[in-house]
Amino acid sequence: MTKEPEEENYAPKPIWTEAHKICKSLKEGSVSCVELMENIYSRVEFINPKVNAIVNLLSREEALSLAKEADKVPIPDRGPLHGLPVAPKDAVAVKGFPTTLGYKPFADRIEVNDDLLAARLRLAGAIFIGHTNMPEFGLGSNTFNSVFGTTSNPYDLTKSAGGSSGGAAVALATDMLPLADGSDMGGSLRNPASFCNVVGFRPSIGRMPKGLGTAWYGRLSTTGPMAKTVKDTAFLMSIISGEDNTDPLTLTQFRNDFLEAFTPYKILKDRPLKIAVSPSLGDLPVDNQVLNIIKSSAETFKKIGANVTYADPPLEGAMEAFQIQRAVSLRGLGKMLDQSVKQWRDYAKDTTIWNIEKGFDLSIDDMIKAEVIRTNIYLKMSEFFKEFDLLLLPSAQVPPFDLSNEWVKEINGEKLETYIDWMSVCCMISTTGLPAISIPGGFTEDNLPVGIQLVGKPREDIELLKIANLFESETNFYTNKPSIY
């Protein structure tokens, strides 16, 4: 008698290739919401225990019940995300779910309302199945916390997934979610995108709902979309972006305009694409493997007809201003914790406490100085982008690092003082308020992903997405998937 081969232990293949296409199928009814939910949960149940990317997860039974109800909705009444399972970052309030921010005293807070970002997802027909993991309060580009633990990189489970939107990046890279969202103060969309070979888009300040943080002074943070491809990123942007009447810095833009980015940027002979390449923003320490990928990316742009010049942008004082205004924001967090959590320092990690206390130590002169620096930077960057259409630089100064390290303390033998310094290549760009995107740029010798960061002209978010689409169409690095499944 012939013995039947044992069934292999593997995750079923995703039933989608591009998120915007599965959304179209769900909206038209050619794919059922239950079919997609079954496929996603079969993948989540196999993959998520290995990487710990999705938290606050509904049971399969609860999720399928929601999918069955979605299938009953008449085709004409369906929105652009109808029946799509989503899990916003664990900083986004979703009605009926806890928003923990990765902080143990907040583990049982159940929300009674949606944040505006979640409300837009819900209005578009998405089904909430949980949250994606993040570091405590979103601080630090390594996703771990005392509530849910550590998120691992799917390309090497011993490496960091980046952060703070690390859970979102991993869920995308492993096809546990077709689309995701994140937020970014000093690189929290761009860094995990780089580490996990996905796309993270930091829009212009004011392009997205305000979310957490200050509204006027020292505005550094923004929410933004994440996806496997630039097209899917633009698709999600067409749904979640838009005016926010509670935000004094909000920008006007028709959401559907972002669908223009489905067409890659076209380089014209009489209108060349002019790119500035800054491998280290002047003198930042950058790992040699990252530098090689930046140089290779510059050659790719040359190959497709762009004019490429090595030039550093005028960002004098950017890191000082960033540190001050970040601390101002965290001073507000510290005041909230003083009022709501007894002995809050007993639960917080050391870097959180250090950064909050740095905020309390600031003087009014420090704050004014930071604002003056940022104002001058914006003026100079506006002039810089009269000469160039795009700035190309690293998304992260290092490839994914060992999970045993909380943060990168040394690059190329140069010791770094704070847990933020190794992210300077993103933090300094944040001070400009300009749109920036991390897209897959290549791989190290050990097959670890490395992203490239593209920075666009003031308020030219759509043009930036179109240029990113051009590079992606030429390279297709996003097709190199992790071997975890």
Image: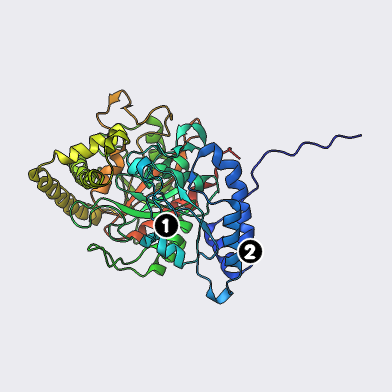
Q: Nearer the viewer, residue 192 or 352?
A: 352
Residue 353 image point, x, y percent: 25, 35
Residue density around tag 2, few if under 14, some if 14–19, many if 20 or more, within 10 Å: some
Name the colouring of the figure. rainbow
Q: Which residue is mark 1?
A: 94
Closer to the N terminus: mark 1 or mark 2?
Answer: 2
Q: Nearer the viewer, residue 62 or 368?
A: 62
From where the camera sits, is residue 268 visible? no
Q: Nearer the viewer, residue 296 or 242?
A: 242
Residue at coordinates 52% horizontally, 36% vertically from top-left? Answer: 155
Residue type marked 1: Val
Residue 399: name its quadrant: top left
Residue 325 image point, x, y percent: 19, 46
Q: Secondary structure at mark 1?
A: loop
Residue furthest to the bottom: 76
Residue furthest to the left: 365
Residue 458: name its quadrant: bottom left
Tag nearer the camera, 1 or 2? 1
Q: Is residue 304 left or right of residue 270?
A: right
Vertical side of 160 occupied by 382: above or below: below
> Tags 1 and 2 in contact by the CB under 8 Å rule?
no
Q: How many discs appear?
A: 2
Q: Which residue is mark 2?
A: 31
Residue type marked 2: Val
Q: Quadrant of the C terminus?
A: top right
Residue density around tag 1, few if under 14, some if 14–19, many if 20 or more, within 10 Å: many
Q: Secondary structure at mark 2?
A: loop
Q: Is residue 105 left or right of residue 284?
A: right
Residue 189 image point, x, y percent: 38, 47
Vertical side of 342 occupied by 203: above or below: below
Residue furthest to the front: 342
